[in-house]
Image (cartoon, rainbow, N blue to C red):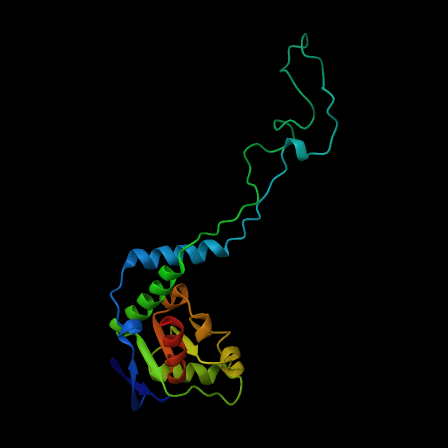
């Protein structure tokens, strides 16, 4: 078991917490992290780009002029891709960019992402993070006191004051432990865990 200091919102050490080595101290393999992050980003793509092809254009199928004798190209109907308003050749069609990754690999990548923060000394555990009102300035002062402005904050349950206070800070995000994912962990420089969320994370990853 790894042991880390538990801080308060003033950055003072108040106690210690144990972290499971099976979750927070596993060997990190960049290729697995890359595979899962690529999967997450690909799943966010809409894939709705689409064009009208020749068969989708509304118009007459009459040949515009006779085949021979005019000295012009052998023109077909008005829906030709060569004419204004005609169909598009080789344009995009709606598609899904989603990629499948085995559950075992996704769970392993999440452990590796958490471990990378712990091993790089970028993981902070707080005893509590209570805001009595929605106040971005107050949240910013707490993060400055911790020297962790660029951070992902993980809570055990919904905390509306904290979640709404962080909306105007582009370098800060609040997630509940069930929504924890590899991309967000790696995107932010620091990872701030509320002490109460550790058991939920370990329970999720040690099943």
**Residue 24, x across and y down, in percent:** 29, 73
**Residue 160, x across and y down, in percent:** 53, 81
Q: If the image is split into quadrants, where does the N terminus sit?
A: bottom left
**Residue 61, x across and y down, in percent:** 73, 25
In the rendered view, does 74 fall on the left or right side of 185? right
In the rendered view, does 2 fall on the left or right side of 63? left
Give the image quarter of residue 91: top right
Q: Is residue 181 above or below residue 196?
A: above
Residue for point 69% across, 23% down:
77
**Residue 81, x across and y down, in percent:** 61, 29
Q: Is residue 62 above or below residue 113?
A: above
Between 54 and 11, which is closer to the camera in this rendering?
A: 54
Residue 86 seen in this snapshot: no
Query: Residue extending furthest bottom?
Result: 14
Residue for point 38% across, 65% down:
182
Q: How many marks?
A: 0
Residue for point 72% across, 19% down:
63
Q: If the image is split into quadrants, where does the C terminus sit?
A: bottom left
């Amino acid at each position: 078991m790894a042991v880390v200091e538990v801080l308060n919102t003033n950055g003072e050490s108040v106690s210690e917490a144990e972290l499971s080595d099976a979750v927070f101290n596993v060997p990190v393999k960049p290729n697995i992290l890359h595979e899962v992050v690529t999967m997450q980003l690909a799943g966010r793509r809409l894939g709705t780009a689409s064009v009208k092809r020749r068969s989708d254009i509304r118009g007459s199928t009459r040949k515009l002029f006779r085949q021979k004798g005019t000295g012009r190209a052998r023109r077909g109907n008005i829906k030709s891709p060569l004419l204004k308003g005609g169909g598009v050749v080789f344009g995009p069609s709606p598609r899904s960019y989603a990629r499948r990754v085995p559950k075992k690999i996704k769970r392993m990548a999440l452990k590796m992402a958490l471990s990378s923060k712990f091993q790089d000394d970028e993981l902070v555990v707080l005893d509590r993070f209570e805001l009595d009102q929605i106040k971005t300035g107050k949240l910013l002062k707490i993060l400055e006191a911790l020297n962790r402005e660029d951070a992902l904050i993980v809570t055990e349950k919904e905390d509306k004051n904290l979640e709404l206070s962080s909306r105007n800070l582009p370098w800060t995000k609040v997630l509940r432990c069930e929504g924890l994912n590899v991309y967000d962990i790696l995107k932010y420089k620091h990872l701030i865990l509320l002490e109460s969320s550790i058991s939920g994370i370990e329970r999720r990853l040690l099943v």
